Amino acid sequence: MSAPAFTIPAPEGRADILVGLRRRKMARSAHAYVRGSTIKFYEWLETSGGSLPEGPPVWICGDCHVGNLGPLADADGHVDVQIRDLDQTVIGNPAHDLIRLGLSLASAARGSNLPGGTTAHMIEDMVEGYGAALAGEAEAAKPKPKLVKGLLREAAKRRWRHLAQERIEDIRPEIPLGRTFWTLSGTERDDLAALFAGDVVRDMVLGLNHRDAGDEVALLDAAYWVKGCSSLGRLRYAALIGIGPEGRKPERVCLFDIKEGVQAAAPRSATAKMPRENAERVVAGARALSPNLGERMLATRFGERSVVLRELLPQDLKIEADRLSREEAVTVSRYLAGIVGRAHGRQMDDATRAAWLADLGRGRSKTLDAPSWLWTSVVELVASHEAAYLDHCRRYALAA
């Protein structure tokens, strides 16, 4: 049976459809529900009774799940695994990133039908990897997981045609309208053209990838982008940009993601001084945590909204951990926690790192080589999210 025809909604009718899409996407699996339920995570955190350690205030991801880490290219094309999404970033408690990552890994383990003992080993290795990275141990001290090595090899080979075929289905500078890309209003299109014609955005575009500072920048095509899970329902656009007089040639085209910055659910440190504009907060957090990403982002205004502009590069990939073997689950846990540990650690001086490492070493039991607060938090969160996921499915998936 063929799929029912899809009618692209008018701009004024997007909101209700996006809410339904988000609910259905979160119903696909327990791990998908975890990825889309950041607010629920922090609601639980408020009731944790102050049992968590108070780590040094640094920029944290705020939504540190497996899908938010992966290979990222810098402006010169050099690729590293870093944090990919900083919508929830704040100056806060680094323990929150550890717990959120632990919850995500435990959910991925359940989705891979791995036993509970494997989850315990994953949390142990996660703490070990985080601590080693925090202490400054070289990334090469432990071999990369096969999953990560494969992604990095793939990233190194990718060119514009791969990104174009993946995102817009063709190398031609046109965005195909359908379930993923929706029609813009005339005002939206005019405003996007004006945005990229402005000096600040133009200078940012030409400052990447060794482009000629004298080139012109032109909007070739644009659409409303139905993308992500937690971002469904907020302002988001895809824009194809042509560079210079031959701006329609594939090698002279680039793809930009324009995303509304919204208030973070993650609690911030009481003494933190952060930008008041949400988009500026996201860019500041990215530059602290993920330099490859931060250097090709810009915070600006789009009408009355605060938005982040980001050029997408072919080398940017997401880690998918929904089907893991026992061995891979443990090595991936250690490796990804190390990425987070390096992101946190580069913001601390030696004394602060040593004190935070000492705090992490406390509260370990004879039967688990990980802090009891972390294990207890992950167990409670897995249980509460599993129940919430089933209730979510009953209310929304069955109704759909």
Image (cartoon, rainbow, N blue to C red):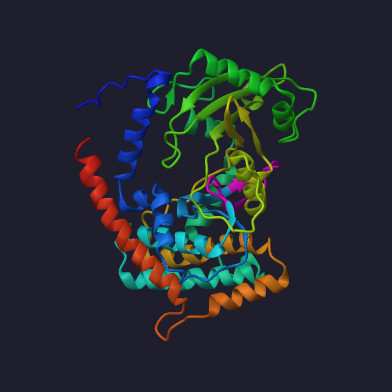
Q: Which image quadrant is residue 346 in?
A: bottom right
Please indicate, yes or no, whether residue 106 appears anywhere in the rendered image: yes
The relative height of residue 87 versus residue 308 in the rendered view (above or below) is below
Asked whether 278 or 282 is in front, the reply is 278
Query: What is the x, y in percent for residue 176?
Result: 45, 21
User: In the shown orientation, is residue 353 left or right of residue 13?
Assistant: right
Instruction: Give the residues in magenta.
Output: 72-89
Q: Seen from this angle, which residue lies furthest front? A: 270
Above or below 9: residue 77: below
Q: Residue at x 66, y 75 (%)?
A: 354
Q: Is residue 388 magenta?
A: no
Residue at 34% x, 62% y is: 382
Q: Quadrant of residue 163?
A: top right
Q: Nearer the viewer, residue 105 or 349?
A: 349
Residue farthest along the bottom direction in this orientation: 366
Q: Is residue 50 above or below residue 343?
A: below
Residue at left 52%, top 40%? 262
The residue furthest top is 186
Tally of marks? 0
The dominant secondary structure in magenta is loop
- Which residue is more in the foreground, 202 or 216? 202
Examine the rendered structure and indicate whether residue 61 appears above or below residue 332: above
Determine if residue 248 is in view. no
Quarter of the figure that contains the N terminus: top left
Quarter of the picture holding the C terminus? top left
Give the x, y percent position of residue 12.
41, 20
Q: Position of residue 128 (x, y in %)?
A: 53, 73
The location of residue 374, given as percent across then percent down, is 45, 70
Q: Is residue 375 left or right of residue 208?
A: left
